[in-house]
C-alpha cells in the first residue's frame, strides 16, 4: 500500500528536542530504547563491529544539566599578533611577497584557483539559459550584450 501524503509525525524518535534537561535524541539511535542498534550494509572486514561499538559507546549524558566540561587554561587570543612597531617575524622576506607587484613571489605562489576561471566555469553551465533569455523579443539590448560578452569569453 502506498504511504499517505502530508505530514507524518515520527513514531519512535522525538519530533524535536527540548532545551537542557528536557532534551531527547531525535534520530532514533540506540539511546532510544525502542530502536535496536543499526547494522551497516555492505560493510568491509571489521567495519560492522566498529559501527555497532560506536553506537553503543555514545549514550546520552545522564546528568540533568548535560555533560560537564572542565575549563582548560585561559587562552590569550592576542598572543600571536605582531604589532605595527614590533620587529619583523620574517626579516628575509620582502613586504610585497604574495602580491602581484614588487619583490618576492606573486599571488600564484599561494596556490589559489583563479577566481575568473571558476566563475566562467559556473557561468558556462547556465549560458544556454541566458542565451534563451537574450533571444526573447522583450529582452533589452544590454542583456544581449552581456550574453554576447560571456559567449566570447568562453571561446
Image (spheres, grey):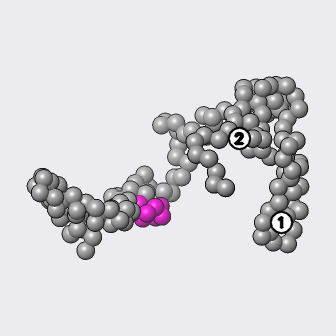
Instruction: Please give the range of residues in magenta.
Output: 107-113
154 shown above or below 94: below
Residue bearing the label numbered 2: 10
Numbered mark located on residue 111 in the image:
none
Q: CA distance from mark 2 to mark 1?
A: 29 Å
Q: Is residue 105 visible?
A: no
The quadrant of the image that shows the N terminus is bottom right
Label 2 Cα crowd, 10 Å radius (few <14 / some 14-19 / many 20+): few
Q: Nearer the viewer, residue 2 or 84?
A: 2
Which of the 4 image quarters holds residue 74? top right
In the rendered image, residue 112 lying in the magenta stretch gets the answer yes
Q: Position of residue 127 (x, y in %)?
A: 28, 64
Horizontal side of residue 38 vs 125, given as left or right:
right
Which residue in the protein does label 1 denote? 47
Rendered residue at 87%/68% (across/down): 46
Q: Is residue 32 above or below residue 103?
A: above
Q: Is residue 135 magenta?
A: no
Q: Quadrant of residue 44?
A: bottom right
**Is residue 23 depicted above or below 129 in this figure?**
above
Q: Is residue 148 left or right of residue 73?
A: left
Residue at the image position 35 percent from the left and 65 percent from the top: 125
Residue 53 in sight from this viewpoint? yes
Image quadrant containing the C terminus: bottom left
Compare marks 2 and 1 and give the one earlier in the sequence: 2
Write the residue at 69% across / 36% down. Answer: 15
Mark count = 2
Q: Residue at x 27, y 70 (%)?
A: 154
Nearer-the-camera pick, 136 or 148: 136
Say what secondary structure mark 2 lies in.
Answer: loop
Amino acid at each position: 500500500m502506498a504511504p499517505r501524503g502530508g505530514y507524518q509525525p515520527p513514531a519512535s524518535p522525538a519530533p524535536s528536542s527540548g532545551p537542557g534537561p528536557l532534551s531527547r535524541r531525535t534520530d532514533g539511535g540506540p539511546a532510544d530504547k525502542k530502536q535496536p542498534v543499526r547494522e551497516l550494509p555492505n560493510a568491509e572486514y571489521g567495519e560492522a563491529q566498529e559501527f555497532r561499538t560506536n553506537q553503543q559507546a555514545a549514550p546520552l549524558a545522564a546528568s540533568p544539566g548535560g555533560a560537564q566540561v572542565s575549563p582548560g587554561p585561559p587562552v590569550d587570543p592576542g598572543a600571536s599578533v605582531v604589532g605595527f612597531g614590533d620587529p619583523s617575524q620574517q626579516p628575509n622576506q620582502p613586504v610585497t611577497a604574495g602580491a602581484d607587484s614588487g619583490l618576492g613571489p606573486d599571488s600564484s605562489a599561494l596556490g589559489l584557483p583563479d577566481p575568473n576561471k571558476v566563475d566562467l566555469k559556473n557561468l558556462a553551465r547556465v549560458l544556454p539559459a541566458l542565451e534563451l533569455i537574450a533571444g526573447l523579443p522583450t529582452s533589452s539590448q544590454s542583456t544581449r550584450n552581456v550574453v554576447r560578452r560571456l559567449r566570447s569569453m568562453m571561446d
